[in-house]
Amino acid sequence: MRPTDETRFLALLQEHRAILYKVAFGYCRNREDRDDLVQEMAIQLWRSFCRYDGRVKFSTWAYRVAMNVAISHFRGEGRRIRDTLPFDEVAYELAADDSPAEKAGDNMRALRRLIDGLDELNRALVLLYLEGYTSDEIAEIVGISPGNVTTRINRVKNELQREFARHEKSLETTP
């Protein structure tokens, strides 16, 4: 690659770095794991940059690459680590975490758990939807039709609303 490509890539990455953190937060609870995942996303973006042709916005392309890296991570080592994390380390992470989602209270944590329980595609759809992407943009990122995106998001929203209502009802009945 030419030096101008490197400069252009670094400028685009700096401008859109929040995308990487948003995707990483959707797949990793542990801060160190999120940082590692963001680094892996950046590496993959750099490796793939020579194939970026500008037909879509850089942010759309970067989101797609980041989602693919995150899903691969989630399927592999990430799941094994999360399943075996000791309780005291989890408690420490929760106490030390300064992310907005963790500060938002019980309802936000409950919603986060519900989203975490979704399959990979539905989680990706919800995270993109919550970021304000349109059905057309989401379709471009995940590789399904806009109509399918809209249908799936509506189904997931309805299911999340039902599950959240069950969660709130269980809180009301708990002494």
Image: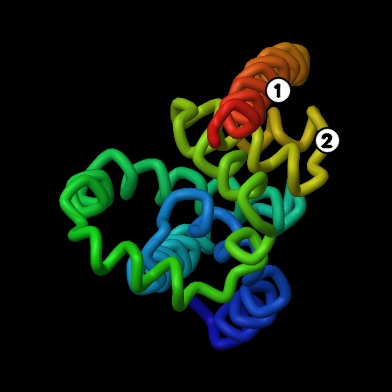
Vertical relation: 81 (above or below) 4: above
Q: What residue appears at the point 68 percent right and 23 percent down from the top-left corner?
A: 165
Q: Which amino acid does label 2 sit on?
A: Thr
Residue 67 image offset from top left, x and y in percent: 51, 46
Residue 126: name its quadrant: top right
Note whether residue 45 is visible.
yes
Mark 2 against mark 1, which lies toward the viewer? Answer: 1
Question: Residue 161, labelled with which disc?
Answer: 1
Q: Where is residue 46 in the image (x, y as percent from the top left)?
A: 47, 68
Which x, y percent locates residue 55? 74, 46
Q: What residue type is disc 1 on?
A: Gln
Answer with the quarter of the image where residue 15 lies.
bottom right
Residue 148 visible: no
Mark 2 and mark 1 lie on one chain; the one further toward the N terminus is 2
Q: Do the residues labelled 2 and 1 touch (CB within 8 Å)?
A: no
Quadrant including the C terminus: top right
Q: How crowded is mark 2: few (under 14 residues within 10 Å), some or many (20 or more)?
A: some
Residue under label 2, please give it: 134
Relative to 160, is 107 above or below? below
